[in-house]
Structures are given as C-alpha cells and as structure tokens.
Amino acid sequence: MEAMIESFSGIPAGANQSPHTLTIRFDAEVDRVVIIDQTRLPHECVEVELKTSADACHAISSMQVRGAPLIGVTAAFGVYLGLRGKDDETARSLSASVIEALAATRPTAINLRWALDKIETRLARCEKNLAEIALQAALELHAEDINACAMLGEYGAQRLQEIWEAKGERAAQAGLPAPESLNVLTHCNAGALATVDWGTALAVIYKAQARAIPLHVWVDETRPRNQGASLTCWELGQRGVPHTLIVDNAGGHLMQHGLIDCCVVGSDRTTLLGDVCNKIGTYLKALAAADNGIPFYVALPVSSIDFSLREGLTEIPIEERAAEEVSHISGLDDEGRVSRVQLAPTGTAVSNYGFDVTPARLVSGLITERGIIDADEAALTKLRDSIA
C-alpha cells in the first residue's frame, strides 16, 4: 500500500519538534506501520505500509529503510507485526523465529541487534499480551531515538559554534575579512532519513542552522548507492541548507586548499576502544582530515556503541553487498523516467564492501546524547558504566 507524501512536513510529538516527516510511524487509529521508501528518493517520496514481519525484513535488507538507528526501530516494529493478531501461546512460540529473521537482515549495524535484544528481554518477562508488549517497546524506542538525536544535535551544534567563532577570531587576528561560512564535510546520509527523525550528523547541521551559524555542507556522493547525492542533498535542500555535491575522492583536495573546516559523519557501530564503523570511504576522509589538521567528529546515539567489542578492524562484521550496486546505476533519463544502466563490462568481477573502520586515533570526538566524549576506552567505559 503506497501513498504519496505531499511535502516533507511531519510533526513528531514532544519538545524536540522538527519539520521532518517521520521515516517510520505507527498510526494507532488503523494499526498501521508506515515507512518512507528511501529507494524511491530523491525523484519521488512515497510511503509504504509494512503489514508483516517479512515486510519489515524486506524493508531493511532492500534498504527501503537504512541507517543504523532506523534499522533498529524498524526491526522493533517488525517483531510487533510478526506477533500481531496471535494469541499469547502462538506469539510465544513464534517470537524467536521472528527475531532471528529480523536479526539476519543486516550484519553490521549494532542498533538492529540492540533493539531486538531489548524487545526479547521485555517479552521474556511477560506472560500475557505479548503483541501489545512488543508494540509498546517499539513505540518507546521510536520516541527515544527522536529525543537522542535531538540532544546529540544540540551538543554537536555547540561544538560547531565554537569552531565558527574560532575561525572568525583567526581571520580578525590575521587582518582578513570575516569568513562567509562554516564549511562542513559529511559522508553518506546520516540525516533524518537514517533515524526516526533529526538524524545524527545532520542533526548537528540542523541544530547549528537554528543557531544562525552560516553553514555550507560539502556532500560526498557516497558510491555505490549514492546516499549522499540522493538522500543528503534532498534533505539539505528541503531544509534550505547551502550545500554542494562532490565526488567521493574530492574531499582531500578541498581540505588541502582550506575549503573544509570540519568533518561530521555518522556511525553504524562504534567499539569500546572508539573505533568507528561507517559507510565505506569514511576512513579515507578521516585520514585526509588528520593530515590537514581538520577536526573529524562522529555523531551517534549511544545505541550505536557496541560495548561488547573492543577492536573494530577484526571484530566488526563488514557487510558485502550485491555486485549490481557497483556495476549498475539508476537515475532519471532525459524523458524524466527512472532508468537503470550498466557501467562496467559484462562479466567484470566486483567487490562491494559496505563499510570500513576508522581507528579511534583519527576521531576528534564522539557526539552523543550524553555529550561529546573522547574516542577512547576510558571515556567509553565511563559512559558504559553510567548507563548500566
């Protein structure tokens, strides 16, 4: 079931309201779970109803929903959909297989397993009304994600304000004109479309925009699925944030020429030592930033930190995706139709790793809803202990 969205304008409940459409929402009046089908963006914005847990699995694996926080919340609603309409005995017998199927959809993002573990624990404590318990847990995770992203956005915006003020002071001391903008590079899409609302890296941008910091965002295209070109540019355009799309390999050049003031990216999984797993290509941006003395921040909710893992390079499973994502590309043709074309010669061998790991030594700080912390074991252990 599909419905066209008239505009990008939903109203999430609570104090942290924004003009976004919720990427996933539950309509209690008609018992519907609805998502934005992100595979259709940016050329059309379409809502799709998830009717079963299999629909939720497909939405995650096909990347109708993507982004670690959003994957977790979608999986939580998937459990509810798998148990909906079942008596408690049947729901109890089905719950393990429903959770197992959802857990198998994407291996890298920790939020998926985190959300499912929370629901599984809640169900184990209850004897009755299991479907209702699953729904309540999903709704709680939904609300928590909105609030966490709004809070981390505020902490990140404060840091951007400090960087902006320092840039102005340096210009004044050098007798130069006041700078026109704060230039931020981001990679992949870590916006509202990667979460329930607000986003992670882009929450920092949106909150900084609200502080009237003059921003310009350099947007990596983010091959092979082009989430930067198709999703981040779409979001920033909707919010009126000045931005420029660049090819993935242009960031280092821009840094060398003083055109980037800081980098802010998201994370699919971060370890106890502070290693950050994110969309493939993130590591190269961090290396270039370190070489040019540019701050490199990672914005993430605490739910994206895997305190059970220490070292990212050897312990985080890296998803390998279909060859067609690299060998083919989709876009609007000259007649305004979405078309898919082949880029590489037929039969070309393709490697398509979805993520890479940025070592903690290259990360200037982790922007969380609990504040900005160092990417090291001491800070992350303290954070872990504070929420245990």
Image (cartoon, helix red, strand yellow):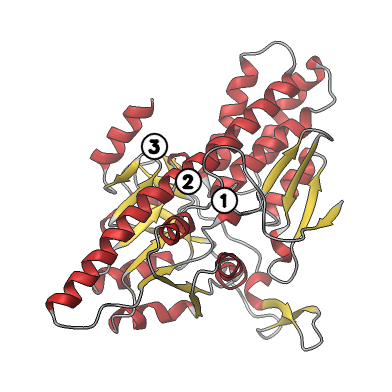
Amino acid carrying mark 1 in the image: Ser
Taking the image as drawn, is residue 31 in sight? yes
Q: Position of residue 68 (x, y in %)?
A: 55, 49
- Horizontal side of residue 368 vs 224, given as left or right: left
In this orientation, which residue lies closer to the viewer: 322 or 159? 159
Question: Depth-wise, is mark 1 or mark 3 nearer the camera?
Answer: 1
- In front: mark 2 or mark 1? 1
- The answer to whether the residue labelled 2 contacts the one labelled 1, judged by CB atoms less than 8 Å apart, is yes
Most extreme residue toward the top, as rendered? 127
Q: Which comes before the other along the chain, label 3 or label 2?
A: 2
Query: Please, what is the three-letter code of the amino acid marked with disc 2?
Result: Ala
Which residue does the image show at 30% across and 53% down from the upper left?
365
Instruction: Look at mark 2 in the image and give the residue it sits on.
Output: 150
The residue at which mark 1 appears reads as: 18
The residues tagged by marks 2 and 1 sit, at their Cα atoms, a distance apart of: 9 Å
Q: Nearer the viewer, residue 111 or 323?
A: 111
Instruction: Pinpoint residue 377: horizontal percent, then vertical percent.
Output: 26, 41
Say what secondary structure mark 1 lies in: loop
| Alpha-carbon span between mark 1 and mark 3 | 31 Å
x 42%, y 42%: residue:
305
Residue 301 in the image: above or below residue 259: above
Image mark count: 3
295 left or right of 150 in image: left
**Rendered-image quadrant of the C terminus:** top left
Q: Residue furthest bottom?
A: 334
Query: Upstream in the sequence, badge 2 or badge 1?
Result: 1
Q: Are marks 3 and 2 in contact (CB under 8 Å)?
A: no
Read off the residue under disc 3.
Answer: 307
- Residue 60 at x, y = what percent? 68, 50
- Tell me the CA gap for discs 3 and 2: 23 Å
Residue neighbourhood size for the residue with mark 2, other residues' Cα within 10 Å, grouped as few (<14), some (14–19), many (≥20): many
Q: Residue at x 27, y 57 (%)?
A: 364
